[in-house]
Image (spheres, rainbow, N blue to C red):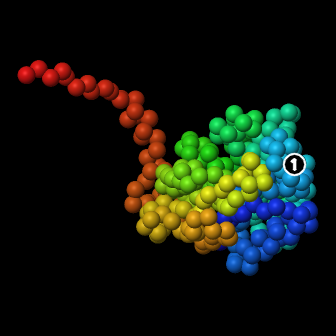
Amino acid sequence: MTIAAAAYPLDWLADWAAYEAKAEGWVRDATDQGAELLVFPEYGAMELASLGGTAVAGDLEAALHEVVAHRAQMEALFARLARAHDVYILAPSGPVVEGGKRVNRASLFGPMGLIGHQDKQIMTRFEREEWSVSSGGDLTLFETAIGKIGVAVCYDSEFPLLARQLCEMGAEIVLVPSCTDTVAGYTRVRVGAMARALENQCVVVQAPTVGDAMWCPAIDENRGAAAIFGPADRGWPETGILAQGDMDASGWVIARVDLDLVVRSRADGAVLPFQHWSEQSARIAKTRIAREKPFNP
């Protein structure tokens, strides 16, 4: 299949029609290049805060609720676009309030409409301490006509057992929508994404927000580069990088991916980390301490 990862700028929107036009343009651009799976970034939905005006967008609490208010309309838009273009789209994630609890939710759409949601599992310090956004629902494996897909939202990609569980359930592709405000933050997610591709011998797709949006403190600075990774193994690029964009450059990064390679790598790769994962348990059970003896001349 052909996968497109967005390096997505957050724009000030004059009205809903401007957002609709932007989303339609981005999807059309990717599908014109043959993309069948389109991945938008974490907190990409926060640009909808601009629809409330400068005072709302500039306030963390008010901005969150403004985006929540547009959630249903946004989901309907991406459902329509996936159906119209006969593609799969991981829409921009954003806040959702359920039962008084705030979660960061990414929704996956296919040609038949909404397939399901994936809520972020492990929250950053900003989400916990300043924004009161909490971990959401369970991990979900999406079984689709184009493959088995898991989602690890940004920080989640830095925790190996989350992606591991998805891949043991059958995931061949792990999508990593991200939103980071420093090069260090972007690097942490990128390294996590590449490590998940290595140890699970699968495809991992990183789609970041890029550029400044100083009108909203939740998404004021954004650093990153879109990329699509695989294991550094036979049949894959030696670097494990299938495609990667320039730093902070907006646009789609696109790669053609053969999921049969995932099956072959897991069964007969140059190394077999996916198969050998369980051997770690036996080895760490025998961990010991070796202390240096005092120097006695």
Q: Is residue 172 visible?
A: no
Whole-percent x and y of residue 263?
Answer: 54, 61
Which residue is most to the bottom? 32
Return the x and y of residue 280 as percentages of the image width and height.
42, 39
Residue at 44% over, 35% down: 281
Q: Is residue 129 above or below residue 294?
A: below
Task: Name the residue nearer the viewer: 196 or 134.
Answer: 134
Q: Is residue 207 visible?
A: yes
Q: Could you classify mark 1 by the number of other residues whose Cα lies within 10 Å: few (under 14), some (14-19), or many (20 or more)? A: few
For this view, does 18 lie left or right of residue 143? right
Q: Which residue is mark 1?
A: 55
Q: Quadrant for the C terminus, please.
A: top left
Residue 273 x/y as whole percent:
44, 51
**Residue at 46% of width from left, 44% of height from top?**
277
Which quadrant is home to the N terminus? bottom right
Relative to 182, 15 lies left or right? right
Q: Is residue 214 above or below residue 37?
A: above
- Judged left or right of residue 202, residue 286 is left
Residue 100, position as x, y percentages in the image: 85, 33
The residue at 80%/56% (across/down) is 47
215 vs 230, nearest the viewer: 215
Above or below: residue 240 compared with residue 168: below
Q: Circle 1 sits in a helix, a strand or a loop, which is it? A: helix
Residue type at the position of mark 1: Ala
User: Residue at the location (89% across, 63% down)?
Assistant: 14
Residue 64: quarter of image: top right
Task: Kindly indicate the quadrant of the structure image that contains residue 80.
Answer: bottom right
Left or right position of 130 against 18 = left
